[in-house]
Image: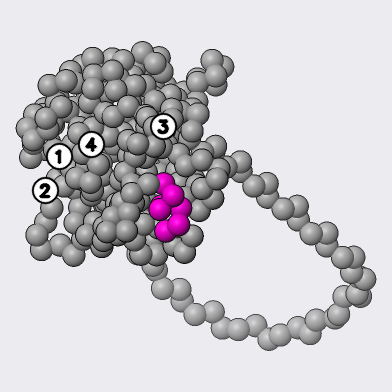
Amino acid sequence: MALSDVKALDAFMKGASYVSGFSPSEKDTALFSSMAKPGPEYVHALRWYTHIASLYPELAIAKHGAAAAPPAAAPTPAPAPAPTPDKKEKAPKEKKEKAPKEEKPKEEKPKVDAEAEAAKKAAKEKEKLLKAIIKEGGKKGVEIEGASDMGGLDFFCTTIELPEGDIELLQLAMTAMNAEPDPEAEDRKGCSGHVGKMIFSAGVKQLACVAYVPGEGNKSSELVPIDEWAASVAAAIGGTAGAAKDAESPNKGKVVEIIVAADADKGKFPIKDKDTAMAAAFAFLRSKGAFPEDNDDDSDDMIFGDDTNLDDYE
């Protein structure tokens, strides 16, 4: 099927949930990034658009600003304990005395070093966390690679959940996103070293951000001075940007870390600052011409028609 207009998309989505298959794919994210929000008269296209926005809040922020991010879910209060029914007290039964048993000598158990066991357990948990972060970063890298290839994006911003505000762990995720794919692995991971990006992780104590501008393979790198980009985002959230360092990436380049501490007395919360920081990062990229402007003109959308095969985009 050829891509023609939003009417055709609406007709297509009447009998489908996603652009291809039964789960969201790179086609959905790429199409979402390149089109305007359908009007209310396109019920099925609007349903798909709203669903993709909820799955990928970073795409919604990129198009419409921090106000488009879905609100965080309120914690569910724990249910109150059920009342214990009154029971009638029974008279104690007389216990018959048992003949004393012969005591057997107790075998001495080897003493356990509590500190060593705790350290061993902590090391295993840390190793498990590092593997999970590398996996999350590698998966995000593939998604960004797909959005870049299909939508022509040179820069992107997204969230990494597992580091929970730890800047060192967030750097590890960035390295995993930029890594070259393992040809013997079952799943592709990384692959996005050619795409400039800023990633964000909100924790209880702070918000951590890492900016990356590749040195090779990106036609818009020269438009985005990394120090200016990081300083612009840090100023928007009252954070601190570090000095630029060499990136661990096959495309070389630089990285800059940004940290902003939580302060409830001043109304500074990492979750809220994350949305503000992401919106500021996209705004800077647009100001430099390194990210497409949000355009509601239907004529500029990626459009569907009858002579294009959607399977060509898998």
- For residue 296, the mark is 3
Q: Position of residue 201 (x, y in %)?
A: 37, 35
The residue closer to the viewer here, 95 or 181, is 181
Q: How is the image coloured?
A: one colour
Q: Is residue 282 left or right of residue 152?
A: right
Task: Kindly identify the amino acid type of the residue bearing the numbered disc 1.
Answer: Gly
The residue beneath circle 2 is 180
Q: Separation of disc 3 and disc 1 at Cα?
A: 30 Å
Q: Residues within 10 Å of mark 1 (few under 14, many from 20)?
A: many
Provide the residue span drawn in magenta.
Answer: 6-12
Q: Count all numbered tags in the image, as a single digit.
A: 4
Please state which of the two labelled residues, at mark 3 or mark 4, is closer to the viewer: 3
Q: Position of residue 184 (x, y in %)?
A: 10, 63
CB atoms of marks 1 and 2 within 8 Å: yes
Please state which of the two labelled residues, at mark 3 or mark 2, is closer to the viewer: 3
Magenta span: helix, strand or loop, mainly?
Answer: helix
Q: Separation of disc 1 and disc 2 at Cα?
A: 8 Å
Relative to 21, does residue 96 appear above or below in the rendering?
A: below
Please state which of the two labelled residues, at mark 3 or mark 1, is closer to the viewer: 3
Q: Residue at x 23, y 36 (%)?
A: 153
CB atoms of marks 3 and 2 within 8 Å: no
**Of marks 2 and 4, which one's residue comes earlier in the chain?**
4
Relative to 308, does residue 236 appear above or below in the rendering?
A: above
The residue beneath circle 4 is 153
Q: Separation of disc 3 and disc 4 at Cα?
A: 18 Å
